[in-house]
């Protein structure tokens, strides 16, 4: 009964390729997020999304795009991968509109671009 | 936008000592302040949070204090144990009513020596 799940756990690919990471949450939350964690452990939010609005961190290259087929899923598509995209990507969800904004994180996807 | 500063970046203590991690924020509209613990190779998980109408909150060996006037909040861990070793992140955000994107500090690596 995993709350937030991501696939794949590891992803190794070459520069220039296009890849996707999938995320699913079974918590019934309204809002989902994508974070990038670099080698220095800095957690940088990339996107915040619910069924009404997408909030994009303006520093995120437009090669990155979130796709949400439904409320429980938020996938991350990355085009033309670059070496600097290597990082751990975390999906998260939160019960926006309710008592707090605790983030429930997925297990992470370690992306390595060679 | 919000800016969160976190100090120290690394904290080394002996088992049984106390540890204090401090964060400052810039946006006076922020009113929700969670702390996350990330063990090596795992996802960040909420350990304690505080809202702006509360000055202090405790949960067993951990406590968080908030000074809204000075715009800073701190995490206190007493009687540290080796299993407390992890990276700790503070964050600041707004509860419903505002455009919400959580801002994380850069993290503190806590090392507890047996």
Image (cartoon, grey):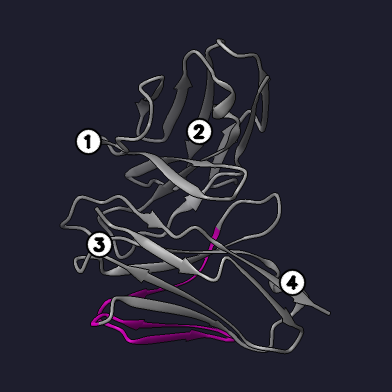
The quarter of the picture where residue B51 lies is: bottom left
Chain that bears disc 2:
A
Crowding around mark 1 (Cα neighbors within 10 Å: few <14, some 14 to 19, many 20+) is: few
Badge 2 or badge 1: first in the primary sequence: 2
Q: Are marks 3 and 2 in contact (CB under 8 Å)?
A: no
* Mark carried by residue A53: 1
| Start-end of magenta stretch | B45-69
Residue A23 badge: 2
Q: Are discs 3 and 1 less than 8 Å apart at CB? A: no
Quarter of image, res B79: bottom right
Instruction: Identify the residue at horizontal 35%, vertical 81% (top origin).
Output: B66
A39 and A26: which one is in front? A39
Q: Which residue is mark 4?
A: B83
Q: Chain of mark 1?
A: A
Residues tagged 1 and 4 counted as in contact (Cβ below 8 A): no
**Horizontal arrangement in the rendering, residue A35 relative to residue B16 (left or right):** left
Above or below: residue A40 compared with residue A87: below
On the same chain: label 2 and label 4?
no
Expressed as whole percent of the image width and height from the top left, the position of residue B33 reads 37, 69
Q: Secondary structure at mark 3?
A: loop
Of the image marks 4 and 3, the number of the one nearer the N terminus: 4
* Figure check: A100 above or below A2: below
Kindly report which numbered mark, 1 or 4, lies closer to the viewer in this rendering: 4
Badge 4 sits on which subunit? B
Which one is nearer the viewer's eye here, B76 or A72? B76
For the residues labelled 4 and 3, the Cα–Cα distance comes to 31 Å
Q: Nearer the viewer, mark 2 or mark 4?
A: 4
Where does label 3 land, which residue? Answer: B95
- Disc 4 with disc 3 on a shared chain: yes
């Amino acid at each position: 009964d995993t709350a937030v799940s991501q696939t794949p756990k590891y992803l190794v690919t070459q520069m220039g390729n296009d890849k996707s990471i999938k995320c699913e949450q079974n918590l019934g939350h309204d809002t989902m997020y994508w974070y990038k964690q670099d080698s220095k452990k800095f957690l940088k939010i990339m996107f915040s999304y619910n069924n009404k609005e997408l909030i994009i961190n303006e520093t995120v290259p437009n090669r990155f795009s979130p796709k949400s087929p439904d409320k429980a899923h938020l996938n991350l598509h990355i085009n033309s991968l670059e070496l600097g995209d290597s990082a751990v990507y975390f999906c998260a969800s939160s019960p926006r509109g309710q008592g707090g904004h605790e983030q429930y994180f997925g297990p992470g996807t370690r992306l390595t671009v060679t | 936008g919000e800016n969160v500063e976190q100090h120290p970046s690394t904290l080394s203590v002996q088992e049984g000592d106390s540890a204090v991690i401090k964060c400052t924020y810039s946006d006076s509209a922020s009113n929700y302040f969670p702390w996350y613990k990330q063990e090596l190779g795992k996802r960040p998980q909420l350990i304690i949070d505080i809202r702006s109408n509360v000055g202090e909150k405790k949960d067993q060996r951990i406590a968080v204090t908030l000074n809204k006037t000075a715009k800073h909040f701190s995490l206190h861990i007493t009687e540290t144990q080796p299993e407390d070793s992890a990276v700790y992140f503070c964050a600041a955000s707004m509860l419903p009513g505002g455009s919400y994107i959580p801002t994380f500090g850069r993290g503190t690596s806590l090392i507890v020596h047996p």
